[in-house]
Image (cartoon, helix red, strand yellow):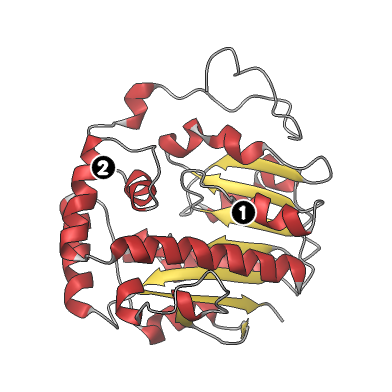
Amino acid sequence: MTSADAGKPDKGSWMSRPVAEVNPVELRTDIPHSARIYDYFLDGKDNFPADRAAAEQIRQAFPDVPHAARQNRAFLIRAVRYLAGELGIRQFLDIGTGIPTSPNLHEAAQEIAPDARVVYVDNDPIVLAHARALLTSSPEGRTAYLDADVRDPDRILTSPELRDTLDLTRPVALSLVAICHFIPDEDDPFGIVRKLVDALPSGSALVLTYLTADFAPDDVARLAQVYRAQGISITPRGRDEVLRFFEGLDLVDPGLQPLHRWRPDDTTPTDLTDAQVGGYAAVALKP
């Protein structure tokens, strides 16, 4: 984003104020960043030598991690299309958005429902720097970007960006994809998810993916060790622990599954093993 672009709202965006400029110093391109590492595994271009070096260390620990990243993204798109298409949900709250990767969530939702509304939430400078790509809503819908931390759900739920975009008396799909395993136990990830879900009305949905060591314990243990060595907190969990995030909710068939086994479509590789994807995924509805 150039300074010349900074004062111009995107066509189709509801926002009248520009996305904040980001000081390059804040990006700390000399330090590996989880969003840029993920971008690298998705064959993105928004990563730097430190990210690529860390990513290659992670790949050495868990050679199939690019498969996991791609299947995590593919699950999100399938889940959004299911929620918008089959359930008719028109509002989405995506926390831990990451660097924009097409199709973005609002593109998948608005392809089915042009009037869909999406609030993206992230607190990483690298994501903020690219946030304008998340604000290219269809004319009928709306998108907004909120610079906030998942560990501060009260700020998210009371923000003008959310309140001006979403109607919390109508169903909202809450997306927490590949984010909760980065929340340290001392910050109570289960409590954070519960508070967010409690704020949503009946008929809302929780979309969540989570890293697990259930299928490839040695590889995932090495992967976690590399992340931690880079100063990035990460906590893999087993199936029963991941299910705790969905307590009080009704899991959508087929329940909690490895990423590629949740309602696969004709683009889902048929030769992937559970060990290669290393993560769980589910969608659940609030009664």
Q: Is residue 197 left or right of residue 90?
A: left
Q: Which residue is mark 1?
A: 105
Work out whether mark 1 precedes mark 2 in sequence or the reverse, and give the earlier one: 2
What kind of element bears circle 1? Answer: helix
Corner quadrant of residue 9: top right
Q: Amino acid at mark 1?
A: Leu
Residue at mark 1 to residue at mark 2: CA–CA distance: 24 Å
Q: Residues within 10 Å of mark 1 (few under 14, many from 20)?
A: many
**Residue 72 shows up from this direction:** yes
Dots 1, 2 in contact, CB < 8 A: no
Q: Which residue is mark 2?
A: 51
> Which residue corresponds to the image point at 35% horizontal and 81% vertical from the top-left?
274
- Where does the image place residue 213, in percent across and percent down from the top left? 27, 77
Q: Residues within 10 Å of mark 2 (few under 14, many from 20)?
A: many
Q: Above or below — where is 48 with respect to 228?
A: above
Q: Is residue 198 left or right of residue 261?
A: right
* Residue that lies at the very extreme toward the top in this rendered image: 4
Q: Above or below — where is 150 with respect to 276?
A: above
Quadrant that contains the C terminus:
bottom right
Judge by depth and name the residue closer to the eye, 106 or 239.
106
Corner quadrant of residue 184: bottom left
The number of numbered discs placed on residues in the rendered structure image is: 2
Q: Above or below — where is 148 with respect to 68?
A: above
Q: Is residue 193 left or right of residue 39?
A: right
- Where does the image place residue 41, in percent across and percent down from the top left? 34, 53
**Residue 194 shows up from this direction:** no
> Which residue corresponds to the image point at 27% horizontal and 57% vertical from the top-left?
233
What kind of element bears circle 2? Answer: helix
- Where does the image place residue 56, in percent across and percent down from the top left? 19, 51
Q: Amino acid at mark 2?
A: Asp
- Where does the image place residue 165, in percent across and percent down from the top left? 75, 46
> Which residue corresponds to the image point at 57% horizontal and 73% vertical from the top-left?
266
